[in-house]
Each structure stands twice: as structure tokens, then as C-alpha cells.
Amino acid sequence: MELLVFVSDVGFSIAAACVGMYFVYLTQKFLLESVLEKVKGLIVIIKQLDSRVTSMSQDILKIDTLLSEALDLPSKKDGI
């Protein structure tokens, strides 16, 4: 009954526009929630990749130091 009173007060076109706006709002809310979940998943993956790159970088520096010592090469700290 309240809907009919609202339609009679403001007119059918304005009431239809309000319903349409509500539908657009619900659709946008649904889409943004799904995008947000995917972005959170990507953030987790990026953090894991960053930690892997950091550990690999440290491992490469250790290997470089060991090879430099084993082959009697000047280290990067000494200057080439």
C-alpha cells in the first residue's frame, strides 16, 4: 500500500526511476564485492611472490659470495 501511495504522490515515471536506481545499486554492489574478493586473492599471491623473490635474492648473493671465495675472484665490495 505504501508503494501505491508513493506512486500516486510522485508519479509513475519517478517511482520507476527510483526502482531502476535501486536495481543499479544492487548490481553495482554485487559486482564490486566479487571484484574485491578477487583483488584480495591477488594481494595474497603478490605477497607470496615478493617473499619468494626476496629469499631468492638472498640465496643468489650467498652463492655469489661462495663462488667468489672458491675461485679467488674479487668480491663486489672490493670493486672490479
Image: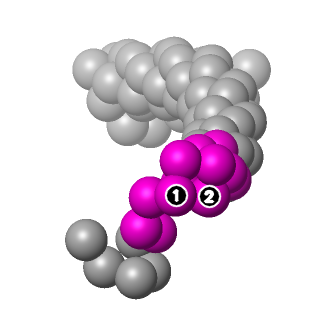
Question: Could you tell me the amino acid type at mark 2?
Answer: Glu
Residue 22 visible in this rendered orientation of the protein: no
- Closest to the observer: 30 or 44? 44
Is label 1 in a helix, a strand or a loop?
loop
Judge the density around disc 1: few (<14), some (14-19), many (≥20) Cα neighbours within 10 Å: few
Q: Which mark is residue 72?
A: 1
Q: Give residue 80's quadrant in the image.
A: bottom left
The location of residue 24, given as percent across then percent down, is 43, 21
Color encoding of the figure = one colour
Identify which amino acid the numbered label 1 is placed on: Asp
Q: Is residue 67 above or below residue 45?
A: below
Residue picked out by circle 2: 69
Please report contact status of discs 2 and 1: CB closer than 8 Å, yes or no: yes
Q: Position of residue 34 (x, y in %)?
A: 63, 19
At x 27% / y 20%, what residue is drawn?
13
Residue 63: image quadrant is: top right
Secondary structure predominantly adopted by residues drawn in magenta: helix
> In 3D space, how far apart are the residues under numbered discs 2 and 1 (Cα atoms)?
5 Å
Q: Residue at x 55, y 24 (%)?
A: 35
Crowd around label 2: few <14 · some 14–19 · many ≥20 (10 Å): few
Is 74 a magenta residue?
yes
Residue 5 position (above or below residue 19): below
Name the side, left or right, on which 11 lies relative to 25: left
**Would you say residue 37 sits in the magenta stretch?**
no
Q: Is residue 28 left or right of residue 42?
A: left
Quarter of the image for the N terminus: give it. Answer: top right
**Relative depth, front residue between 43 and 9:** 43
> Which secondary structure, mark 2?
helix
Residue 11 image position (x, y, % from top left): 34, 27
Q: Nearer the viewer, residue 22 or 62?
A: 62
State the extent of the magenta-drawn residues as a range.
Answer: 62-75
